[in-house]
Amino acid sequence: TGEDSGGQTYTVGIDTTYPPFEFEDSSGNYKGIDVDLIRAIAENQGFEVKLEPMDFGGIIPALQAGQLDVAIAGMSITDERKKIVDFSEPYFEAGLTLVSQKGNNEIKTLEDLKGKTVVVKSGTTGAQFAQDNKDKYEYEITVLEDSPSMFQEVSNGNADVLIEDYPVIAYAIAESNLDLKIVGDRLNGDHYGIAVLKGEHADLLDMINTGLQELKDSGKYDEILNTYISE
Ligand code: GLN
């Protein structure tokens, strides 16, 4: 209830389902790197969080509408987004990759996508990448709202490839029996950051950055990562 610490409660947007960063376990509890990280930062800095899972595409609009104070959703730090939100220091290195059905030996690079269908998730850097390169490689784009739907669309053969963040698809392939494989090298490199609405939350952003640094220094940050990712 927040009474114990006396701290303020902030509403935090997370992606509906984006393991290992956010997901619901079998008893309906939210888990994942992002969830543990924002909870640990809040504990360290003496505030409370209320998690709001939503489609990724709705998160920045919800920040703008004042429905969210914070977003942590495997959100990549981009110059475009920096016009609308302020980001914390980076907390995870990611980047995009192409993904096809396991048995697909036809598609090896972007050059092989002519006339093919590329699935992306609304509002993501993957969607932006697909749009930016569409004319060059001459593929069709299908936009879906969440990652499991993208995985489904390619594994059942409705589309040829999808674009997803490397750590997310690598985790999904390792954890579940998906008929999917990573194709080629990463398409780009980026970093995840925690977002607040631009110019509105300087104090909150300070707390987030201080908390994040203290978790890194104490080893808690590594502990959270190691809970979900072994490497
Ligand atoms: N990292 C990607 C982005 O920022 C995807 C995030 C997501 O799907 N949750 O757009």
Image (cartoon, grey):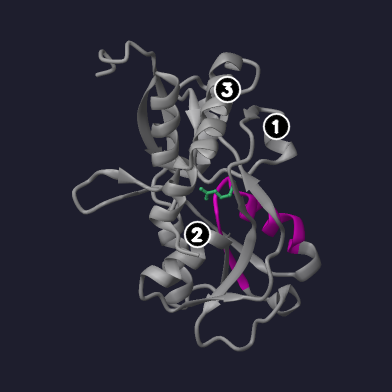
Decide which of 125, 145 is in the foreground and name it: 125
Q: Which amino acid does label 2 sit on?
A: Val
Q: Residue furthest left?
A: 27
Residue 70, percent across and down? Answer: 49, 27
Question: Taking the image as drawn, is residue 166 in sight?
Answer: yes
Cβ atoms under marks 1 and 3 closer than 8 Å: no
Decide which of 199, 34 is in the foreground and name it: 34
Mark 3 and mark 2 lie on one chain; the one further toward the N terminus is 2
- The residue that appears at 62% across and 65% down in the rendered structure is 97
- The residue that appears at 37% across and 33% down in the rendered structure is 52
Q: Mark 1 points at which residue?
A: 82
Residue 35, percent across and down? Answer: 40, 40
Q: Which mark is residue 168?
A: 2
Q: How crowded is mark 1: few (under 14 residues within 10 Å), some or many (20 or more)?
A: few
- The residue that appears at 56% across and 24% down in the rendered structure is 64
Decide which of 94, 112 is in the foreground and name it: 94
Q: Which amino acid does label 3 sit on?
A: Leu
Magenta segment boundaries in residue numbering = 117-134
Q: How crowded is mark 2: few (under 14 residues within 10 Å), some or many (20 or more)?
A: many
Query: Label 3, label 2: how many angstroms apart (C-alpha)?
Result: 26 Å
Residue 207, percent across and down? Answer: 53, 21
Q: Residue 205 carries which label?
A: 3
Query: Label 1, label 2: how many angstroms apart (C-alpha)?
Result: 23 Å
Please determine whether, in this image, residue 50 is positioned above or below residue 140.
Answer: above
Classify mark 2 as within 8 Å of ligand 1 or not, answering yes or no: yes
Horizontal arrangement in the rendering, residue 53 relative to residue 160 (left or right) = left
Please determine whether, in this image, residue 153 is positioned above or below residue 168.
Answer: below
Please determine whether, in this image, residue 48 is positioned above or below residue 137.
Answer: above
